Amino acid sequence: MPVIFTRNGVRRGVLRGIPLLLGIAPFGVVVGVIALRHGLTLAETLLMSALVFAGASQLLALELWTNPPDILAVAIAALVVNIRMVPIGAALSFWLDHMRGWRLWTSLFVTVDHSFALSVAEHRAGGRDAGFLLGLGVLTWIAWVAATAAGHVLGAAISLADDNPIFFAAPASFVAILAALWRSARQDVPPWLLAAATALGAQALSLPAPMPLLAGAFAGAALGAWREGREARP
Amino acid sequence: MTPTAMTLRLDVTLAIIAMGLVTYFCRAGGYAILRAMRTPPVVDALLRNLPAPLFAAYVALSLSRQDMAAVLASIPCAAAHMRWGNFGLSIVVGVGAVALLRWAGI
């Protein structure tokens, strides 16, 4: 059956995305609270969520945020966190290759891990309507922008002290992401340990941000890739 | 001058636009490039293996600057995610554990 793009498909994507909002909203609220803590105004927080629309990279950039901001450092943070999205577009080629113009480029703009995973599942179940991806993406985009705005407004209303446990939400988010990426001790412990040790070593050498993070990330990734290649060889 | 809620400062706006461009490049540029050409297997393997070490490095750096309560709270936070797979709930468990451990004097 040929791939189509209909309003029904968009609506189906929106409906399928509603349960996801339970997971997206608290994360968005956390990003809003952290943005406020790092001195971003409500308008700047809205702009970041609307333009970037990638929670982990927003959170990481905020952790590296300085006043005035180091544009190169936050751009590198966004690149390193979001580079994982490069293969996502290719993996959605079963629909994207049949789309053109604003439908294609807007669908790519609002694609995140959740919409990617659900679209693959929809396609495997026989779905041929590429509107599904756009509907799902637009819903999560609206929810994300609204949730970060709510977090910012909430944080401003209740004025939180610097040692408030809520600020553990940022590292907690990344601990949860790590838990989600866990495969097995044999596969994950060596590259994760090397990444952590390299990052801490670079920090001890007083290398400027985001160098410790990048050094750790690439050291761990190189070890993971090398081990993967070694195991694939007969 | 103190910025108001609707202030957009030039340097902050430029940083956000840079982040947005880089992120859109990853989403759309990646698709366009991979559709047109094949990347070397070593680059594929590096991209595939980058996310988890990146977050491992971030967590190590972040926890190295926090108290023992935060380090210990990471354990129930990770366990909650392994058990229920819900980001919102895992964050709530982590924050709750930090509050509890600090209240207990750790």
Image: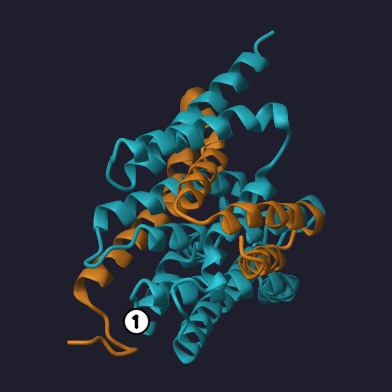
Chain colours: A cyan, B orange
Q: What residue is shown at x 74% (from left), y 76% (from top)?
A: A15
On the image, the x and y values in percent for residue A106 come to: 49, 66
Position of residue B100 in the picture relative to residue A61 (left or right): right
Is A106 drawn above or below residue A89 in the view shown? below
- Residue at x 50% of width, y 62% of height: A54
The mark tally for this picture is 1
Residue farthest to the front, as pictured: B105
Quarter holding residue A127: bottom right
Q: To which chain does the residue with label 1 belong? A: A
Q: Nearer the viewer, residue A199 or A52?
A: A199
* B56 lies above or below A14: above
Q: Is residue A122 in view from this perspective?
A: yes
Q: Is residue B77 left or right of residue A195?
A: right
Q: What residue does disc 1 label?
A: A41
Q: Position of residue B32 (x, y in %)?
A: 44, 46
Helix, strand or loop status at disc 1: loop
Task: Answer with the quarter of the image where residue B89 lies.
Answer: bottom right
The percent position of residue A133, horizontal first and vertical second, equals 63, 63
Nearest the eye: A27 or A203: A203
**Up-down: is B86 above or below B31?**
below
Q: Dividing the image into 4 quarters, which one contains the C terminus of chain A? A: top right
Residue type indicated by callout 1? Thr
Q: Residue furthest left?
A: B1
Q: Position of residue A8 (x, y in %)?
A: 71, 75
Viewer-side residue, A119 vs B103: B103
Mark 1 Cα shell of 10 Å, populated few (<14), some (14-19), many (≥20) = many
Evaluate whether residue B25 shows in this view. no
Residue at the image point whose x is 20% and y is 74% from the top: B10
